[in-house]
Image (spheres, grey):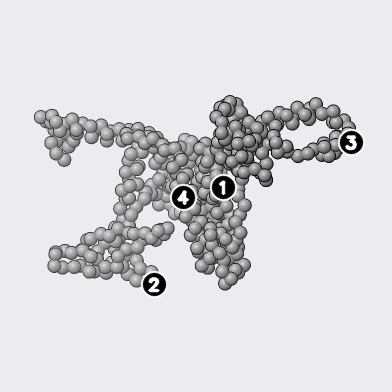
Amino acid sequence: MDSQLIPAHLKHVQEESKISLTAIQKSPYDSHPNGLVGHLFALTLTDDGPDPKSSASKLWNSHAEYQESGPSSNAITGSLDPLPFSDIAESLSRLSLSSPTPLSCPNNPPVSQIAGCRIPKKDRCQHSRQALKLLSNIEACANWCFHLLLDPSDNSVAEVTNELMCLRPALESITQKTDSVNSCKKEVTTTLDKLELEVKARQPTCPSSNDPEPVNVNTEHENTPPIERMDIVAQVAVLIGVVCNIIMGVSQCSGNFIIGTLSLLLSLAFQQSDGRLSASHENIIQQLPPTMEAALNKFSLTSKTVTYVVCSCHCTYAPSYLKGSTVPSYPEYCTHHPNPETLCGEPLLDTQASGASLPKKTFIYHDFNDYLAGLLSRINIEMMMDTACNNLTTSLSSPPHFIKTPFEAQFL
């Protein structure tokens, strides 16, 4: 329809709607259907059709005559009357949907046309069809996630993020290697990559701090021996057993007997008249170690050490460990150069009858990281070290006349 005829057409439709509504409301035939039928029949018989003298006919008149005398002649030849804004808004409102359609996961595409791929006959086995059906579900969920991202709220972004965490493993679990599956899997992977980029673009970025504040961690009791956290009565009992084992040379079995005897004596001494123990006494009994080895561990006498292999030229080699293994491995030969022209090349390992290789000579030393951690965990040690470094900085600018500590010197 021509754009010039639209206002006239809308006005004509509104007038006809008002006339029809008025006629229906005032019709005397509403309560009598038979009377309405008879009235319409009479109007049909008496209707002579359009009067050619009063209105133009498309059959007998030319096109120009019909436009001059037709029902829309005023819209074609005359000036157009402006329409009120309320009528235009009402007409446009009829074109809008009455209620929004809720978002839902779209129907899965047919298995033979996933991501634009068609399944050849050679790939239409059961495993391939199952893989393609799974790819169809993943593609449908990805498209649904794109619809969810039309809502810029944080809840929609979080929901799509959770869906991605499920869709990625599902896509990686498809291991079928046919041509159709590989082609469709590549297309679905591209779709998920685009979806992931869209989610990252919508996620809020956390402001980064250029100078973050240090985090204070209390490590005062990190390397404290367990004996210090025991009751005084349990400490004395464990000390008696350890002295008998280390200083007096009592064997391991005899030390276990002494520890068990002390535990029994304390249980008998703590018993009440009814044979029960109080909560505090029962706690002391539970703190006592059952064996001499457990009693020695309460003092933390054994520290973490590193075993180095030593060559006859006194060159040492640290152990190396494979990922996930605790068995140390060492080089087979010494690679030290006593002088630039000479290579030592001495074998460092002995091969046992079982096939295992053991170092010929070892050197056991404390692990530096473990030692430093224990040193910094002691009370006020870290503060003393920081104070010494601060005094060193001060003494560099104005060194004292008499030097009492190495930190007061001009260089270390």
Q: Residue at x 36, y 50 (%)?
A: 304
Question: How busy is the neighbourhood of tag 2: few (under 14 within 10 Å), some, or many (20 plus)?
Answer: few
User: Where is residue 410 shown, x and y percent of the image?
Assistant: 13, 36
**Three-letter amino acid code of the residue under disc 2:** Gly
Q: Position of residue 399 (x, y in %)?
A: 13, 31
Tell me the quarter of the picture where residue 100 sits.
top right
Residue name at image x 52 percent, y 49 percent? 164
Tag 1 secondary structure: helix
Q: CA distance from mark 1 to mark 2?
A: 61 Å
Residue position marked by numbered label 2 in the rendering: 355
Please give left or right for residue 248 compared with residue 349 in the image: right
Between circles 3 and 1, the one closer to the viewer is 3
**Can the viewer see residue 233?**
no
Mark number displayed over residue 34: 3
Answer whether labels 4 and 2 touch (C-beta < 8 Å): no
- The residue carrying mark 1 is 144
Residue carrying label 4: 194
Residue 325, position in %: x, y?
Answer: 41, 59
Task: Mark 4 vs mark 2: give the one in front.
Answer: 4
The amino acid beneath tag 3 is Asn
